[in-house]
Image (spheres, helix red, strand yellow):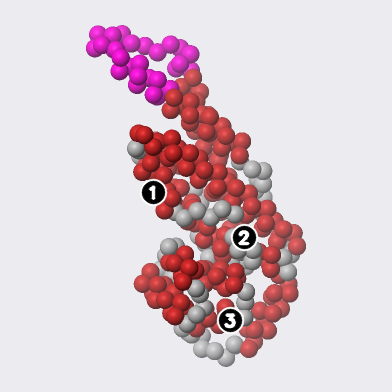
Amino acid sequence: MILLRPFIIFITFVLSYIPVLQFIGLALLFFIYHVLIRNRNLHIERMKKVYETNNLSFPDLKESSPTIWFVLYMVSFLVLNVFYLYLVQQVGSLTFEEMQTFTLPSWQIYLFLGSFLLSWISYAIMINRIDKDQWQLQESEISNKIVKNRFIKLRDGNVAMLLRIVTLDIYQWFLLFFLLRETTIHYFEDGTATGRYLELIKKDDQETQNESSTNDTAEKPAQEDLYEKITHQIKNIGKDERYSTIFSHVTSISDKKKAEEILEKLLEDGYIEEEEYKKLQQFL
């Protein structure tokens, strides 16, 4: 998986509104959508193996890649932008009297309407496949006790496109930011970002071990300190799983200050390294 930091959205946003650097911003924008689609495909592919191995019912969602819709969206988006630049150049060269009688040829009007309609349809389907499909899989993972927390929020592609128009495209940047953040956190929690999902393929064996460790700690107080709870869980597990477990706990804490204090203590006690500490801190 390619895990991008949400900060890249801000960089892309700035570049997209600087005339001489717009092409870089546009390239980064398409790259972000490509990453979201690629990660979505890998997420579904990897979790399907977990479901099949553990004889679980995989949710009824479309597993085929939405790449074709992404390509159609790129084409329609580029056509609309070229048409806009052409129209601005054409209108800018007219005198005031000529502007009063200016009309577009019928084929240009049809081209604009067709591109706009294709852009709407392809974008709506692409967002549905990125967001809705993974939200549905997330809900299934929760019901099957693969994950505990709900990070990916349900959104509709048609509503997203409408909000883009109403907000003059500002909504697109917020949507991309939250999609990157939510999906990344979820991938860490279910292990598809770290490789821990491979352990879920042997879920039956893992549950037996968990039951044994639960019996050993059954006499601990019900309201034990969160820090002690985390350190107890990560004592005898591998580096990737330890990172994923810490990530899951600290990102679910609503109090950012408390989460930072726990991270600092984990760093001081040698449970995480400086590089891991900095990465985790960015998701708080």
Marks 1 and 3, Cα distance to the nearest angstrom?
A: 38 Å
**Residue 115 visible to an observer of this rendering:** yes
In the image as oriented, which residue stretches furthest toward the left?
Answer: 96
Residue 192: numbered disc: 2
Q: Earlier in the sequence, mark 2 or mark 3?
A: 2
Q: Quadrant of the N terminus?
A: bottom right
Left or right: 90 with respect to 1? left
**Residue 166 visible to an observer of this rendering:** no
The residue closer to the viewer here, 250 or 263, is: 263
Can you give x and y, in whole percent of width and height, for residue 104 in the image?
40, 13
Can you give x and y, in whole percent of width and height, for residue 151 in the image?
50, 60
Can you give x and y, in whole percent of width and height, for residue 238 in the image?
62, 74
Amino acid identity at mark 3: Lys
Q: Tag 1: Cα neighbours inside 10 Å, few (<14), some, or many (≥20)?
A: few
Badges 1 and 3: C-beta atoms under 8 Å apart? no
Q: Name the residue rendered at 38%, 41% in the picture.
A: 15
Marks 2 and 3, Cα distance to the nearest angstrom?
A: 21 Å
Looking at the rendered structure, the secondary structure element under dot 1 is helix
Total residue callouts: 3
Marks 2 and 1, Cα distance to the nearest angstrom?
A: 26 Å
Q: Earlier in the sequence, mark 2 or mark 1?
A: 1
Can you give x and y, in whole percent of width and height, for residue 277 in the image?
46, 70
Q: Is residue 109 magenta?
A: yes
Residue 184 to residue 243: above or below: above
What residue is shown with label 1?
10
Left or right: 199 with respect to 265? right
Please provide the residue range marked out in magenta. Answer: 83-110
Residue 6 to residue 127: above or below: below
What residue is shown with label 3?
235
